[in-house]
Structures are given as structure tokens and as C-alpha cells.
Image (cartoon, rainbow, N blue to C red):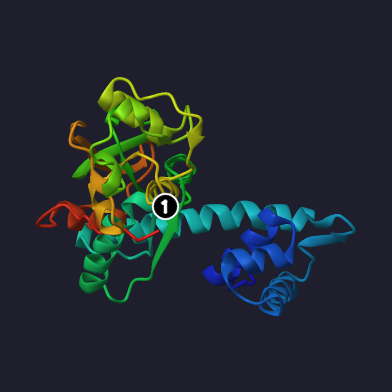
Amino acid sequence: MRTLKLSLRQLQIFLQVARRGNVSAAADELGISQPQVSRTIAEIEKKLSAPVFFRTPEGLELTPTGKLLLNFAEQTLSLAGETERAISENLGVPACPLHVAAPPGLLGYAIAGIRAFHEEYPELPVRLEVGTPERVLELVTRQHVAVGLYAGPESLLPREVAGKEVGEQVWGLLVPPALAETPPPKLPFVLPPEGSLLRRALEHSMGHLPESPHQAADVRAACALATVGFAAYLPLACTEAGLARHPTSPKIVLPIHAVFPEHSRYPVSARAYVRLLSGLNQPVTLFPRP
């Protein structure tokens, strides 16, 4: 019986090309060059003595041999991944990269955790994606990242994700110092867009927010607008940008959750990251200046 001797790396490259239907897209996803992908497919076809793709004007389509190989590749790579995870979990040591997503208002917290993770596991690469809270939850739900950060009540999380509380972030009504004594009804407010996750989190904590025609897409934008004369509910760390807390407004404490897909395996690297976040001595208040 002839032995094909296809490597796991060859199967990974083949699988990406099969899923994408395009060498260029597969190369981008894998972070390698197009010629390298093309060479790998040629090597596979040489070992099989049969083509695995039809070349069509619309892209690449699997041949009958390619369809058989796709089924084999999916099973083999799945088994290899399960084996690696089982061994890692038995040893308690992460064996895969850490992918984290966070909204701009939690960047300081996310980076502090990444710094601690890198000190403990310097050989493992880390990728940080920044987006709105909605985008963070979408990445987590689709399992594009291992763990995301979210500030707000757990009741607002979708059913597809689970969360572990790892800290808290204190918010308040911030204004330019010159407006600190102005009655709130006379202040021009800027708020997160209606229906957004951040708006719902604030409404859940405050009960009722002032109606305002001014909206800001995220915390960074609201902080920038507040510095030029608006009032905004923001993390108190935004006082670093020269803002003052309005004396009539109560503080809002939003719990910070590390969120991950509820019905999937929780990667060891993500568990290690959450453990390190939970072990930080005090809440991180670092906030990037607008």
C-alpha cells in the first residue's frame, strides 16, 4: 500500500484553499505568500497523482479527489487539535496563540492582561482586536477570538456567550471644568447611539439618561467631544484628558466581564489570560487620550 505522507501543514493549507476557493484569500488568512500556497497544492497533487481542484473563472472548485481529501483533512486536523488541547489541558500550559478583542474604553485593562500573559508565556503570540462592544461580542460568538472584554451587566450578554467577572470600571458624568457647576438640564449631552450595547448598559445602571440629539460611536469619540463643551457619561479615567466629574451625578460601577463562546471548548490560553486579569491587584484605569 502506498503511503501519501501528507503533513498537517499541507492539510491546513489545502483546507484553507478549499474553504476560500481562492489561493490569494487562503494566503492572507494563513499569513504566508501566494507562491507558497500554490507550491503546497502542487505538492499535494503530485503525491496523490490527481488534481484536487478544478480551475474555473469563478475560482477553485474541488475535484472528486479533492472532496475525499477535504473530508480526510477536516477529520485529521480536528483530531490533531483535540489531541493538542487534551495534552495542554493535562499539563495546564497554553499551547496556542491568544486572540483577544476589546472596545476602546477597555484597552488599558486588556493591555495590562496581555502584558501579564506575555511575561508568563513569552513564546506565545498574542493578537488584540479593537472594536465596538457589539463587534467584540460578534467576534466571540463566531469564535474568531478566544476571549473578549465587555463592561456592563451580565444580563445584557447574548445567550451564545458566557462571562466571568474580572474587574470593574467606574463611570460618571464628565464635563469641561468650566461647566462643572452648570445644572445638568442645561448641559449639551453626547451619548452612545440609541440601542447600542453601551447605551443599554448605562440605561440599565442609571435608569434614565437625558435625551440628546448628539451621539458618539464609542468612548473615545465621546471623550473628545466632552473636551470641547459637551457633557458625557464616561469612565472616570477620562479625567486624564482634562475633564471634571459633575458633582450632582452619582458614580456608575460597570462590571468588566471576560466573555467567551458558551458552547465551545475554552482554550487554555484564554483561561490563563482570564486568570491573570482576575489576579490584577487593582482595577486598571489607564485610558488612551483622544
Q: Is residue 89 visible?
A: no
Q: Residues within 10 Å of mark 1 (few under 14, many from 20)?
A: some
How far across and down, in percent of the image, does residue 102 sit?
A: 38, 51
Q: In this picture, is 153 found above or below 10?
A: above
For the C terminus, which image quadrant? bottom left
Q: In this picture, is 41 found above or below 171?
A: below
**Between residues 74 and 170, which one lies in front from this camera angle?**
170
**Between residues 88 and 67, which one lies in front from this camera angle?**
88
Amino acid type, residue under disc 1 in the picture? Ala
Would you say 120 lies left or right of 22 here? left
**Between residues 185 and 6, which one lies in front from this camera angle?**
185
**Between residues 230 and 254, which one lies in front from this camera angle?**
230
Q: Is residue 227 visible?
A: yes
Would you say 246 lies left or right of 191 here? left
Residue most toward the right? 57
Read off the residue under disc 1. Answer: 224
For the N terminus, which image quadrant? bottom right
How many numbered discs? 1
Label 1's element?
helix
Residue at image position (72%, 69%) is: 48
How far across and down, in percent of the image, does residue 225 sit?
A: 43, 47
How far across and down, in percent of the image, does residue 87 sit?
A: 28, 61
Q: In this picture, is 208 found above or below 62?
A: above
How far across and down, in percent of the image, does residue 77 sit?
A: 50, 58
Q: In this picture, is 142 found above or below 106?
A: above
Would you say 6 lies left or right of 88 here? right
Residue at image position (71%, 52%) is: 67
Would you say 43 lies left or right of 195 here? right
